[in-house]
Image (cartoon, rainbow, N blue to C red):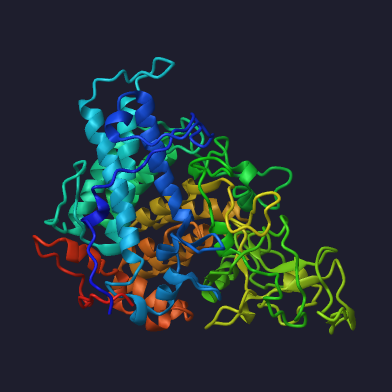
């Protein structure tokens, strides 16, 4: 047993250390650490405070911990992306991944990473509260260099950050304390968990303010827009069971501003759908992007994105075992996205969904839904001169099918292919995948984020731009709200916009199913096809219903992680350190979790 540890609840005595940045909030200037009293004395100071909050959001795609000789590890967003119906833990598991793979063993109040997440979100709440409360009473000049008053925009952005944090908190832990004041040196030990509905109405209040005062388009690269607030408003109202307002906010976002589904591609893009995710195309000219996140190498405040590293394969270092190609050691290259770690595994069920939405479901043909074809899902590697095609003794590795040594230009298929040397690229079949385990470093993987920094093919971190929110999610929220309002025809129209872009099979009302449950399951399937590895899937499943949707879909469709998943696990336990620190007032634990003082 380890000695019981106490934290100053939520670390709320902390104020984020904000780093001085220029207008694009990534270019380096001399570093300054500010106190709040020093920082919030000018418009520039408030902008710097917001920059610190943008950095907090970027942490979703950054690491939770560090090793002594490797770098950033444990991608933060796996807590709400993996262990779901469409994404499982991969063959290389970090700390959080292990919990998502062995629910009964590691999902307990003293699990060592829960309080890190809890603290992260409440640090963001406190930083946002500091901006909001100080701005309201500040007498600074709010005009920018162009004479435009920025007061309401500053408040709106800070309120979205606060809503962002409470959205995470309410989905992960349910009832949580609502804090609206700036905390400096006062230690609180009497926080009260507020009901989930109250927390969500508080989120809505912040988002409705933001929907009024944020700009329709990003004021500078990487900043949020009205569409962000409107999309989350639609989601929050849906979570409260108000489908009319959910539809209204999604519709207002889709029809009231400049946003549109991206329907064209650059000449170098392999498909319209995947063109959106190419770093060079993630900019303000794409009308589908509501919010993008940016990183930069070698710059103070530039951050470190490890999404690519965690979601792609470690295909070199003699790691994979390919059928008919054991022993091949592929080089890490920029074209292949650099070295990955395979900590994420797309479930077989999620991949098979793409056959259902294809014009021709026969995988031998090429009419596969573009969201699940070879340009969107990594299925094979083409050998090059950079690859090592001999064994350790220098002997050629034989291609047993072609009865000759492997050679540059040959195609090596991943685990879903029965024969690694089959020349029919369109013969790749997801039906050949294992239902119950990820094949070590040898499984189909998403190519949405498979980009490494130029010249840094073996690094953990990358610094490419990444889409955080796009209009396709808003469209699917409107479709869901339409179904809940008894207007399936409108839902079909929205779904078909996305299917048309993906060259997929268009649907009719009959395809949705006859019952509400069938229709909502159809929406969940379509969200998986469109938003795989983008949406915070755990939240979507929980919002639909922990018992009716989340539990059965995880236990039936994720046979890698779902075998030990229980209804208790739909909500995580309040960290024991938080409960221990709230010494003045009893704080109840979530149902099903016994109090524990041991860190396991």
Question: For the point 21% across and 42% down, which residue is it?
Answer: 184
| Closest to the observer, 421 or 112 | 112
**Quadrant where the image shows the C terminus:** bottom left
**Quadrant where the image shows the N terminus:** bottom left
| Closest to the observer, 150 or 232 | 150
Count how many numbered circles sit on residues in the image.
0
The spot of residue 91 in percent (x, y) is: 56, 76
Task: State the residue lying farthest toward the top.
Answer: 147
The spot of residue 143 in percent (x, y) is: 36, 18
Position above or below: 10 against 574 = above
402 left or right of 259 in image: right
Q: Locate residue 348: give its quadrant.
A: bottom right
Question: For the point 61% across and 52% down, which residue is it?
Answer: 273
The spot of residue 514 in percent (x, y) is: 38, 69
| Closest to the observer, 5 or 540 | 5
Position above or below: 164 against 286 = below
Position above or below: 372 against 99 = above
Task: State the residue lying farthest toward the right.
Answer: 404
Question: For the point 12% across and 62% down, which residue is it?
Answer: 583
239 left or right of 527 in image: left
The spot of residue 329 in percent (x, y) is: 76, 72
């Amino acid at each position: 047993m380890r000695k019981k540890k106490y934290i100053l609840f939520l670390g709320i005595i902390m104020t984020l250390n904000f780093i001085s940045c220029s207008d694009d909030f990534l270019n380096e200037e001399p570093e300054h650490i500010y106190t709040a009293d020093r920082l919030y004395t000018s418009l520039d100071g408030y902008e710097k405070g917001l920059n610190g909050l943008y950095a907090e959001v970027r942490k979703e795609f950054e690491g939770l911990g560090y090793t002594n000789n490797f770098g950033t590890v444990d991608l933060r967003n796996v807590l709400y992306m993996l262990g779901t119906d469409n994404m499982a833990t991969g063959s290389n598991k970090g700390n959080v991944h292990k919990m998502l793979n062995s629910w009964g063993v590691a999902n307990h109040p003293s699990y060592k990473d829960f309080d890190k997440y809890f603290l992260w979100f409440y640090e963001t709440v406190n930083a946002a509260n500091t901006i909001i409360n100080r701005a309201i009473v500040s007498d600074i000049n709010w005009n920018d260099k162009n004479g435009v008053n920025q007061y309401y925009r500053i408040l709106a952005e800070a309120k979205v950050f606060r809503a962002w944090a409470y959205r995470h908190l309410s989905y992960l832990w349910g009832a949580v304390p609502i804090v609206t004041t700036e905390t400096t040196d006062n230690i609180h030990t009497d926080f009260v968990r507020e009901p989930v509905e109250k927390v969500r109405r508080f989120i809505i209040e912040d988002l409705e303010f933001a929907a009024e005062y944020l700009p329709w388009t990003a004021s500078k690269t990487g900043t949020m827009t009205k569409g962000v607030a409107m999309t989350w408003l639609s989601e929050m109202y849906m979570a409260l069971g108000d489908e009319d307002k959910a539809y209204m906010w999604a519709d207002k976002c889709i029809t009231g501003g400049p946003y549109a589904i991206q329907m064209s591609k650059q000449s170098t893009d392999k498909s319209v759908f995947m063109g959106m995710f190419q770093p060079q195309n993630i900019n303000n000219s794409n009308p589908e992007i509501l919010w993008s996140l940016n990183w930069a190498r070698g710059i103070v405040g530039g951050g470190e994105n490890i999404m690519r590293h965690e979601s792609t394969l470690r295909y070199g270092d003699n790691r994979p075992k390919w059928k008919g190609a054991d022993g091949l050691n592929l080089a890490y290259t920029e074209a292949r996205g650099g070295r990955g770690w395979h900590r994420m595994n797309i479930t077989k069920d999620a991949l098979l969904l793409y056959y259902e939405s294809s014009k021709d479901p026969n995988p031998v043909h090429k009419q596969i839904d573009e969201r699940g074809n070879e340009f969107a899902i990594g299925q094979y590697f083409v050998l090059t001169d950079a690859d090592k095609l001999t064994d350790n003794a220098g002997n050629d590795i034989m291609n047993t099918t072609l009865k000759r040594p492997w050679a540059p230009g040959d195609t090596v298929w991943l685990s879903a292919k029965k024969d690694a040397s089959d020349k029919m690229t369109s013969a790749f079949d997801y039906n050949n995948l294992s239902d119950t385990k990820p094949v070590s470093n040898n499984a189909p993987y998403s190519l949405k984020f498979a980009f490494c920094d130029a010249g840094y093919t073996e690094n953990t971190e990358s610094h490419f731009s990444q889409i955080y929110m796009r209009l396709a999610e808003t469209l699917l929220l409107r479709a869901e709200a339409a179904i809940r309002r008894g207007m399936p025809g409108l839902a079909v129209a929205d779904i078909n916009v996305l299917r048309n872009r993906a060259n997929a099979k268009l649907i009719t009302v009959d395809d949705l199913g006859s019952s509400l449950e069938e229709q909502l399951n159809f929406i969940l399937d379509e969200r998986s096809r469109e938003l795989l590895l983008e949406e915070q899937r755990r939240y979507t499943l929980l919002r639909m219903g922990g018992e009716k949707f989340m539990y059965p879909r995880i236990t039936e469709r994720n046979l890698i992680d779902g075998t030990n998943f229980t209804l208790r696990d739909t909500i995580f336990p309040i960290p024991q350190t938080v409960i221990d620190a709230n010494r003045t007032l009893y704080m109840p634990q979530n149902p099903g979790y016994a109090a524990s003082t041991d860190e396991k």
